[in-house]
Amino acid sequence: MTDTPWLDDACSLVDAYRAGERSPVEEVQATLAAIERSDLNCFSFLDPERALAAARSADLSLPFGGVPVGIKELDQVEGWPATEGSLVFADRVASVTGESVRRFVDEGGAVPVGLTTASEFGGLNVSVTKLNGVTHNPWEHGRTCGGSSCGSASAVAGGLVSIASGGDGGGSIRIPAGYCGLVGMKGTYGRLSRGPHAFFRPGTVVLGVLARSVRDAARHFDVCAGSDPRDPSSLPSAGRWEADLGSSELTGKRVAFLPTIAGVDVDARTVDAVRAAADALIAATGMREVAVELELPNLAAQWAMGNLSTLLAELGPRWPKCRDQLTEEIALGTTMAQSLYNLDVAAVAEAQRLEANEAMASMFEQVDYLICPTNPTPAFPAEWPTSSPPPPLLAKAQQMKAAKVAFRGVMASLRIANGVFPRMSNVLIDAAVDLVPDLVTMGGLTIPSNIYGNPAVSIPAGAVEGLPVGMQVLARHHRDAELFDVALAFEREVGWPKVAPPLAALGAVGA
């Protein structure tokens, strides 16, 4: 009987199965037992019967045959809860399975054991919801995993499953990967299908996985990437991502290092750690460092306002009666968006998008890759809604019912005033950003690649005071394979722990 789940990458687990060293059934049993013992709170739903049945009939010839996996709770699995991480949909059940998940399971052979926690509707870069409570970082209990793929990152770094699905609409794969010491790849927009029910807005979401190794992420692309008639934005795939690993010629490629982008304030210790990792990567690959400037607008605020239209579509007639069931930040943002969003805000957001696209395109005319931090700081306390504690007045206002009612009244008045003074909305949005800057800048380092649609990967780049730091590498559109090779070069030259250090002490495979 296996005492602990596999603590190496998923590909090596498949190899162990095929060599007769491990059994899918025993692996699922060990996984379920470990989840029950865990205090990470990273799974919101488990289906032991289905997982054990799938393990018994696992086809070990498939790429992930028999590998226990976590599925992000924002993904759809027919017959499983479809909560979106929200109390509003606590009792809803999925009627379909998302195409990416279907391929992972049916064509990849993965064995889903349950749903991993996510921030509510994927709207925040934190790991706490009213529905599920706090999800903890396995590197240090009480620290955030980021969001929105918080449970997937916690489960993989926490030694519970070797790979788990994620999604990245503004950094939601890369941010948790950075905080938890994992590989987080956001492919070119459209790389993996979002079907069958894919909102176009915000036009930034890319699906993927939280992985312990580059080859795991590449193998996932082999299985799940490719066109889908139910997602018109989906791209074709040659299906040779893993086979072609290491084939890119990186010597002489132009690379730039920037300590920050889009004006985000980045912790100096984080900058130092990423700079050191970048130096090691450049030395290992023979890339040529060049200087470049990248002037980007901070895209988060006006962009986020428009994205909330899909949330209103999902809430439907439940809004605004369901307001008190939502996390404070989601309720606040939705109320503000409904009151402040208008054609003038949309115009500013589109102008910012065009400005960002031009800036990114101009930069990639000068360099092949850009390196910068993934997150502004190491993991902050898990219960915080932002990377800094909320201002005292805002914290008190959130706790006072009278203040909430008054705020709603102000927003209703502003909705009326907007009809007379439409440009006032942008002034008020900018003022809100000044009041709570972290709420819109936590993803400021990752959002530009979502807006532009280019691939970007977060690579584990060491630690600051015992907490992981992510090195983000950006490339041009459709250069996903090159990014895999950049990450692979760093993995081979420097490497990183496959799981959080407290678990790594158990041994490379948890035997």
Image (tube, grey):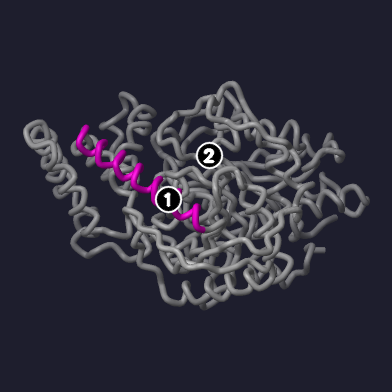
Callout 1 secondary element: helix
Q: Is residue 491 above or below residue 83?
A: below
Labels 2 and 1: the sequence-earlier one = 2
Residue sitting at x 18%, y 61%: 393
> Magenta includes 345?
yes
Position in image of residue 474 (x %, y %): 53, 55
Tell me: 34 left or right of 410. right
Tag 2: Cα neighbours inside 10 Å, few (<14), some, or many (≥20)? many
Position in image of residue 109 (x %, y %): 77, 37
Between 6 and 336, the one nearer to me in the picture? 336
Tell me: 124 left or right of 374. left
- Label of residue 188 in the image: none
Q: In this view, does 380 lie above or below 427?
A: below
Quarter of the figure with the C terminus:
bottom right
Range of the magenta residues? 343-366
Residue sitting at x 22%, y 59%: 434
**Label 1: which residue?**
448
Between 249 and 456, the one nearer to me in the picture? 249
